[in-house]
Image (cartoon, rainbow, N blue to C red):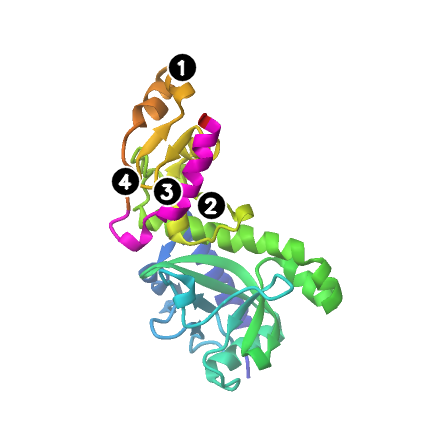
Amino acid sequence: MTDWDLDERLRSAALAYVRAQQLRSAGPVTFDDVAQFEFDGRRVPLLDRQRGIRKPALLDAALSFRTVHAARPDLRPYDDAPGPDGYLRYKYRGTDPDHPENRAMRVVLEARLPLIWFWGIATGLYWPIAPVWLVDEEPREHQFVVAVDAQQFDAWTSTDSSERLVLREYSERVVQARVHQPVFRERVLAAYEARCAVCNLGYRELLDAAHVKGDAEGGQPVVPNGIAMCKIHHGAFDASILGVTPSYEIRIRDDVLGEKDGPTLTYALQGVHGRTLQLPSRRAARPDRELLAERFDRFLAVAS
């Protein structure tokens, strides 16, 4: 028989622990961070090295699940992608609905319990999204439907399928804001070792993942479509004040090079003209040259 009081206390403590770890790191958490969680004097790891779905022995329901890191999303063993309604899906463990891990997820679904979703950023590094909720199961597709915020959860339980399609735009926005954007940022920062590729600034709080090809233009949230930049250089890149050639050379617009406006302009912008981007050591993580060429053509059009 399920001890719901124990479940609530452990689940609440786990959610609070993950939030505290994120605040401490100002970013993602490591496997070792979440493996050290303790409850009532007993260690209860929040992730399993071998399994995607984590159900502690103390509970009947799953506590967390994860999406593994892959250099390319299409190389993942499971495709945790949005459905036609904008809600994300999470695949079963295998295809057997009665697998113990799938049953543990079903308990969560039926009891409407919150979960922690760990998204892989790099090997052993995760971005936690919590709380999330399972709102439905799609047995034919071997997957669960996931709400990533309370409004998404309420919308699923209070509307029918036709109304959800009307709410798709909201669902897509919240998934972009809570999942895709932060996960993309953290993957790019991990590739660049949390330093600006232009000036080498290493304060994570001041760093962004600049898109080479923007979301609105069909750019994908993958590391070769991103460059780690501090907020000044990201703003300059987006405004076509700063450009990057396909050979990774930094260019500053001619009219800006000719201005005189104090040390920030002199050192932060004019001073980086002609430098080469500081690139990830892993070649597969470096900016896509074709995307850079397309973006640099736009920079030249503005500069001319």
Q: Amino acid at mark 3?
A: Ala
- How many residues crowd mark 1 within 10 Å: few (<14), some (14–19), many (20+)? few
Q: Residue at x 59, y 57 (%)?
A: 149
Q: Amino acid at mark 2?
A: Lys
Q: Return the mark for residue 259.
A: 1
- Mark positioned earlier in the residue sequence (1 or 2): 2
Kindly indicate whether the residue at mark 2 contacts the one at mark 4 (C-beta within 8 angstroms).
no
Q: Which residue is mark 2?
A: 213
- Mark positioned earlier in the residue sequence (4 or 3): 3
- Mark positioned earlier in the residue sequence (3 or 2): 2
Q: Is residue 139 magenta?
A: no
Q: Return the mark for residue 228.
A: 3
Question: For the N terminus, which image quadrant?
Answer: bottom right
Q: Amino acid at mark 1?
A: Glu
Q: Which residue is mark 4?
A: 278
Q: Amino acid at mark 4?
A: Gln
Of circles 4 and 1, the one toward us is: 1
- Mark positioned earlier in the residue sequence (4 or 1): 1
* Residue 266 percent location from the top left of the image: 34, 19
Residue bounds of the magenta highlight: 280-302
* Furthest residue in direction left, as rendered: 281
* Residue 230 percent location from the top left of the image: 39, 35
Distance from Cα at disc 4 to Cα at disc 1: 26 Å
Q: Is residue 152 left or right of residue 64?
A: right
- How many residues crowd mark 2 within 10 Å: few (<14), some (14–19), many (20+)? some
Of circles 3 and 1, the one toward us is: 1
